[in-house]
Amino acid sequence: MARNKIALIGAGMIGGTLAHLVGLKELGDAVLFDIAADPAKGKSLDLMQSGTVEGFDSDLKGTDDYADIAGADVCIVTAGVPRKPGMSRDDLLEINLKVMKAVGEGIKTHAPDAFVICITNPLDAMVWALREFSGLPHEKVVGMAGVLDSARFRLFLAQEFNVSVEDVTAFVLGGHGDTMVPVLEYSTVAGIPVPDLIKMGWSTQEKMDAIVDRTRKGGGEIVGLLGNGSAYYAPASSAIAMADSYLKDKRRLLPAAAWLSGEYGESGMYVGVPIVIGQNGVEKIVEIDLGDEAKKNFGVSVDAVKELMDACKKLDGSLG
Ligand code: A3D
């Protein structure tokens, strides 16, 4: 049986971490594509040598030739530039839009059957543009942000409740920006909703509000501490969870940026919603009932994404 082939478009901090996880989890072989070919080749060699010690046999290949991604089952896109301290994700729009055009065309020509997971920021606008440039079916192109934002939310909740992260479920919906929507009503500890835990005296609404705020600013907190670049370990783990669900047809229910055609009252855009990922890509978009405040916040977040889409259309006429 042939091994899965995973194309990592962008072999920077997240790309290298993704390749390491592909090896450690024995998900398949990986191609590390980057305009900077030598560092991609160097990382591939280093990682394969770690495989000798760790006991994985994944073939990892660095390249700057799109032909090498041919036949990929999954493409994970991190190509572009990350934030520096003081920058918002939206400041990356102009440069990363051009990168999405090149990447979209590369995928269209060489890996049109792949399941594509975009990570490049500003996420919701970039995954939309990447889908437009690639022409792939909407259900085969998604954006990774919700799994990461929810992971941050889950960690902070687990720390506050002093329980294992394993038992905390949480949803963050909406666009991946300061307007993202952590939804407390659907967050639980082993099925016990957070509002009930507050009633049981496990925490207070004030502390929950502070956690929601910290989650919204979770990426910026790390950018400020790193001083040069943005988070990469948790973003890579999050994208691998999505790739794994597709490759193994696990049908996990995960929050991710997906194409809406009427769901949540929106059409023709990508934004973070709960989806089921299986062998066909997005198998289902799950419409949960949002409370008044979450609904209002989701609307604000949707508007912020639409503004970025308009900015993309102004920058590239082919985006209609
Ligand atoms: P970095 O380490 O700079 O890697 C980006 C790589 O892209 C570099 O190696 C570049 O050489 C390469 N690159 C640039 N242009 C091209 C191109 N045209 N074709 C192929 N490769 C190219 O960044 P990173 O890995 O830390 O972050 C990558 C992206 O992910 C950035 O846009 C971040 O803002 C974004 N990011 C998103 C999240 C989300 O949750 C959505 C989280 C963290 C980072």
Image (cartoon, grey):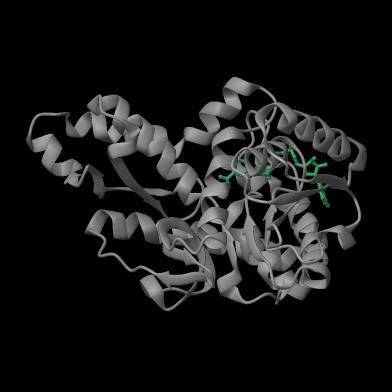
Q: Is residue 137 above or below residue 73?
A: below
Q: Is residue 266 left or right of residue 294?
A: right
What is the x, y in percent for residue 92?
70, 46
Q: Nearer the viewer, residue 91 or 238?
A: 238
Q: Residue at x 13, y 35 (%)?
A: 198
Q: Could you tell me which quadrant the C terminus lies in? A: bottom right
Q: Is residue 140 above or below residue 311?
A: below
Q: Residue at x 37, y 70 (%)?
A: 264
Count the marks.
0
Q: Quadrant of ligand 1?
A: top right
Q: Nearer the viewer, residue 21 or 229?
A: 21
What is the x, y in percent for residue 309?
62, 64
Q: Could you tell me which quadrant the N terminus lies in? A: bottom right
- Which residue sits furthest left? 200
Q: Nearer the viewer, residue 153 or 175?
A: 153
Q: Is residue 231 left or right of residue 42?
A: left
What is the x, y in percent for residue 5?
72, 57
What is the x, y in percent for residue 231?
60, 33
Using the rendered view, name the quadrant where residue 66 is placed.
bottom right
Using the rendered view, name the quadrant where residue 101 is placed.
bottom right
Q: Is residue 4 above or below residue 268?
A: above
Q: Residue at x 53, y 69 (%)?
A: 279
